[in-house]
Amino acid sequence: MAIAPDTTGPRAKAAAAGGPARGAAAPAAQAAAGVAAPGRTVRLRGGLDVATLVGLAAAVGVIVVAITAGGSLRAFLDPPSLMIVLGGTLAVTTASFSLGDVAVAWRNAAAVLIHQTLDPKGVARQVLLLAEAARRAGPETLRNVLPELRGEPFLHRSVTLITEGLPPDAIERMLTGEVEATAGGHGKSAGVLRRASEVAPAMGLIGTLVGLVQMLGSLSDPSAIGPAMALALLTTFYGAVLGNVVLAPLAAKVERAAEEDALVKTLYTIGAVSIARQENPRRLEMLLNAVLPPGKRIQYFDREAPRVGA
């Protein structure tokens, strides 16, 4: 049930007068009113993923320190062992999926190291400002902000569907389908990395068995026992490090990035459907807060809505 808007209070008067809005999304509302605005309306969070890089570097550093403290780092370098673990992991993972899936998974894994995401609170404020502008002047006025939204393709498509007059149910089906398809793609990439993290230790064990067989077959030749033993032990070491220190954390990062992306797109979908239905923005705020995590919920109309003289 929509809540009737307050048409007498100072906030309503300020909104009707086109007063300045607070928050990162203010330029979008200004553009909706026909005022020029900068290209980005919601601040990007992230950039270089320091947590991932520091975590991986710390894990590798601890291992290297432990190796150098008790011996030589060169003793842990064995090309045949690396070939078995790296090549075997890639081959078995590719056999489990496809070349395209594996390539996309590695691209997504590299992307999480430079991951940028939109702030959910800023997204919610932006959606509310667009809803207020559409409620005051009609959904067609949102055509004015389309050039400002090209930096966020999903929001640009959402607003385009609104301005083209599509039914709200059709908008909801289209946008929800896109969110699910994107989430499915990220889920498959995380699955590829999870599979690789499981295969790597197994390939290490296979290399160990190969080394043991070679060692037992060369007991009469003492000079061949050392290389065979190195192959037997180092493949297990490489497999454990690759699977648990590198691949498993990257899979978790891809899953988290997918969740953040799905949350932002869900907020845009809720806002687009609500604007298309011409619902009260206060009701939209409640719908957005129902999706946002507790620590990210907003109180736009109680604390952040434009005031006279702001």
Image: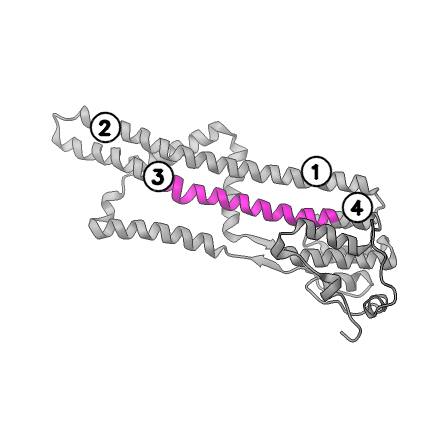
- The picture quadrant where one finds residue 5 is bottom right
Q: Is residue 43 magenta?
A: no
Alpha carbons under labels 3 and 1: distance apart: 39 Å
Extreme bottom residue here?
A: 309
Q: Cβ–Cβ below 8 Å for labels 3 and 2? A: no
Alpha carbons under labels 4 and 3: distance apart: 50 Å
Residue beneath label 2, please?
Answer: 212
Q: Is residue 22 above or below residue 236?
A: below
Residue 293 in the figure: left or right of residue 212: right
| Residue 119 in sight from this viewpoint | no
- In terms of sequence position, does the residue under pointer 4 or pointer 3 come before the other? 4
CA neighbours of label 1 inside 10 A, class few (<14), some (14 to 19), many (20+)? few
- In terms of sequence position, does the residue under pointer 3 or pointer 2 come before the other? 2
Q: In this view, does 157 lie above or below 281?
A: above
In the structure shown, which secondary structural element does the residue marked by tag 3 occupy?
helix
Residue beneath label 1, please?
Answer: 177
Residue beneath label 3, please?
Answer: 240
Q: Which residue is drawn at 70% across and 38% down?
A: 177
CA neighbours of label 4 inside 10 A, class few (<14), some (14 to 19), many (20+)? many
The chief SS type of the magenta part is helix
- In terms of sequence position, does the residue under pointer 3 or pointer 1 come before the other? 1
**Eye-nearest disc, 4 or 3:** 3
Alpha carbons under labels 2 and 1: distance apart: 53 Å
Magenta extent: 241-270
CA neighbours of label 3 inside 10 A, class few (<14), some (14 to 19), many (20+)? many
